[in-house]
Amino acid sequence: PEEQRAAPGEANIVALHSLARTMPRLAARALALIASAQAFYLPGVAPRDYMDSDKVEIRVHKLSSPRTHLPFDYYSLPFCRPDNLVKQAENLGEVLHGAVIQNSPYEVFMGRSEFRIACRVELTKAQKITLSQRVRQDYRVHLIMDNLPAATKMIAEMADGTKKDMYDRGFRLGFLGSKDIPGTEPTKPYVNNHLRFIVKYHRSDTFPGSRIVGFEVEAYSVKHTYEGQWDEKSPKLTSVPLRPDLAPMLAWSNEIVYTYDVVWEHSPIAWASRWDLYLYMGDDQVHWFSILNSLVIVLLLSGIVAMIMVRTLRRDLAEYNSVEEKEELLEESGWKLVHADVLRPPPLAAWLATTIGTGMQVLCMSFISIACALLGFLSPANRGGLLTATLLLFVLMGVPAGYGASRTFKSLRGVEWRALTLLTATAYPAAIFVVFTLLNLALWSHGSTGAVPAGTFVALLAMWFCVSLPLVFVGAFLGFKRPLPAPPTRTNEIPRQIPPQGWFLGRAVTMAVGGVLPFGAVFIELFFIMTSVWLQRFYYV
């Protein structure tokens, strides 16, 4: 018996010894797997290594203005053009943003700091009028190098007295003359015809060559002069090198000579951090204050509502428990007065169900979009990715929309589920589509690139009717097929009469008071969002 009792202990010891021998092998294999693992980059945002004298391509993006909000094609103005104009393939979001990405005549080579003449353009009267009008409307030029947008460097002074470098997207097309600018006439438009490309690169022993981590542009207005007749092959400028005493270039000139120079600067910024200056917000303290303010107001409102409900229920339950006579037990008071009318169908039950279904569609789209953004799939380097993802997710979330609408409609004793499905799939999207079409016609009448092409219009309609509509039907079918749970209370056949209420309990006052507090929770953050939208900046938290 003693030997039999000792046998299990010896087996455990043998098992522990064998486990101790295999643990180092398992650990070595795990380390080998970790060492062999490699990080991956998202499509379209992988770094590119440039060797010395490699050509760095600059693409033109668009012209935009914070005043008109009408984007235009870069080559709609009298700029230098390449011999062969090539358009880059764009995703759905870029097309809806009005971006037309094309090649440019600028020739930039890695590590070469040089001055070049782009071209000389003779302006017609119509081109003079258009160029002067764009300058007065404060249009900005947007270029792209190595997937980085061109930016104007600004130095902002912080609250503690320190200075911080910030980027403003694009550079100004021109400016209006004033008494403070020497050599200019007040209110006259001047065009920036000389560009200085300051390209920042980073080098490391971990990769060959160099990586571009910054693309700054300094725009100048210079009235170039040259000897004799203009020679396309070897022009001789007398205004080079550039000097502060040179007169600026008037936009209403017969000809404009475009020039540029390239300056290369080494930067300690790594490639993974090159977007930080673009995303930096100078008023981040106010930004975080608005977020905390929103959270505090939401928690305060939730606490107030919970406290009122708990106190009301406690008072009513105390009254019910203190009743001694049976006659009083039959009398209803407090919240029990309306318990038989809570689940009564409203007058417009189908519209209520449609609104709930569309709300579920938007809510699911928002949550998935935010999750993808947190994972880095919707980074600013992927231009138009956010708008493309939100549109596709809204179309694909037709199943939750149909399911939520059908479940709500069924609980409200609705039976026409086909009509409800069509209403859910077409009501709110149709209203948005009508507004979108009217805006598109307005953009088309102004000749803006923000106008959606006919092919994209057809693609949006196909996504709506060929993808979203069937998915809403699938969700509605699943929702109506699933049985409803038993209602917690019965509903009276005759609705309870509601006594007249004071003016302060009317619909308009209730809506205003009920909307002020939620708006107060989000209005500061909404200001940042709308500023980013209208001023074409990045919204970054």
Image: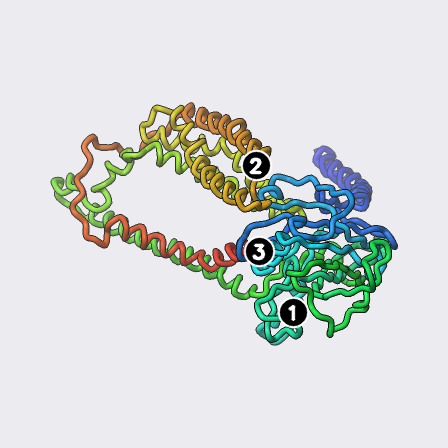
* Residue 419 appears in view: yes
Q: Amino acid at mark 3?
A: Ser
Q: Amino acid at mark 2?
A: Leu
Name the residue at 48% across, 56% down: 526
Side of 103 where 478 appears, left or right: left
Q: Pick whichever of labels 3 and 1 is earlier in the sequence.
A: 3
Name the residue at 79% across, 42% down: 33
User: Closer to the camera, 530 or 220?
Assistant: 220
- Element class at badge 2: helix
Q: From the image, tell me which residue sits under label 3.
A: 65
237 shown above or below 383: below
User: Closer to the camera, 350 or 120?
Assistant: 120
User: Closer to the camera, 523 or 17?
Assistant: 523
In the picture as drawn, the residue positioned furthest to the front comes out as 228
Question: Residue 213 at x, y = what percent?
Answer: 75, 57
Question: Residue 46 at x, y = what percent?
Answer: 75, 46
User: Closer to the camera, 173 or 40?
Assistant: 173
Q: From the image, tell me which residue sits under label 1.
A: 155
Q: From the image, tell me which residue sits under label 2.
A: 392
Mark 1 Cα-neighbour bin, 10 Å: few <14, some 14–19, many ≥20: few
Q: CA distance from mark 2 to mark 3?
A: 28 Å
Q: Marks 3 and 1: which is nearer the front?
A: 3
Question: Residue 278 at x, y = what percent?
Answer: 65, 58
Q: Marks 2 and 3: which is nearer the front?
A: 3
Q: Amino acid at mark 1?
A: Ile
Query: Where the N terminus falls, by quadrant?
Result: top right
Side of 238 where 296 appears, left or right: left
Mark 3 Cα-neighbour bin, 10 Å: few <14, some 14–19, many ≥20: many
- Element class at badge 3: loop
Query: Where the C terminus falls, by quadrant?
Result: bottom right
183 shown above or below 327: below
